[in-house]
Image (cartoon, rainbow, N blue to C red):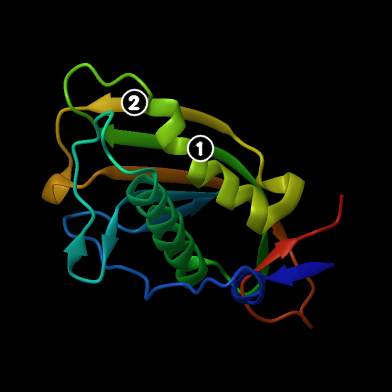
Amino acid sequence: MTIDIAGRLAQLGLTLPEAPSPRGVYVGAVIYNGIAYISGQVSRIGDEIITGPVDRDTPPNVIGLAARTCVLRALSVLVATLPATSAVDRTLFLRGFVNVAPGFANHSQVMDEASTLLHDIFGERGRHARSAVGVASLPGNGLLEIELTVALTPVTPEHTGPSIDTQQ
């Protein structure tokens, strides 16, 4: 059984943004041997960037918005790239680059909202390995950039549209 990604997001009160175009000489995603590698997605909503650096005074709602924005951008790239014959089997790895002020050390907490959202969308198959790295800057002075790696599985021809495979 598969679940429609856009439908699951709608249940959570979320929608996918339009898949962003790469801003350099690379592609938004590469699918190879059943694994989808999603290029880094900065905390950008339209033409606006949720900026950093993060420090101890950064409001949690700003950090959460940046994390959700990055995940939704990554999923929009995945959906735009995913062949009709594949579904997401599970998330494998989430890497986060956090634009931090000197002395800030809670990188992992910044990434928790992104991890939670992936679990909310994919269920247990949303659990993943993760890195959270503090950096001095990101494109556009973004607060956060994530990279996402997911495993894919074949789906039957009668299924259409991007989905999550829920078979355990």
Circle 1 sits on which residue? 112
Q: Taking the image as drawn, is residue 33 in sight?
A: no
Question: Which residue is at 19% across, 49% downward?
Answer: 51
First along the sequence among labels 1 and 2:
1
Instruction: For the N terminus, give its image quadrant.
Output: bottom right
* Residue 154 falls left or right of residue 30: right
Foreground pick, 101 / 33 = 101
The residue at the point 29 percent across, 53 percent down is 43
The image shows residue 38, relative to residue 132, as above or below, that is below
Separation of disc 1 and disc 2 at Cα? 13 Å
Residue in view at x 66 percent, y 65 percent? 86
* Crowding at mark 1 (Cα within 10 Å: few <14, some 14-19, many 20+): some
Of the residues shown, which amino acid type is indicated by label 2?
Val
Task: State the image quarter where residue 95 is shown.
Answer: top left
Q: Quadrant of residue 65?
A: bottom left
- Tell me the SS state at disc 2: strand
- Disc nearest the viewer among 1 and 2: 1
Instruction: Identify the amino acid type marked 1.
Output: Asp
Left or right, 85 with reference to 94: right
Q: Is residue 167 left or right of residue 12?
A: right
**Label at residue 142:** none
x, y (%) of residue 30? Answer: 43, 53
Q: How far across and how far down the image is residue 94, in percent?
A: 49, 38
Task: Decide: few, some or many residues near mark 2? Use Cα within 10 Å; few <14, some 14-19, many ≥20.
Answer: some
Q: Give the answer, above or below, for where 98 lies relative to 61.
A: above
Given residues 81 and 117, the one toward you in this image is 117
Q: In this figure, which residue is indicated by the disc labeled 2?
A: 133
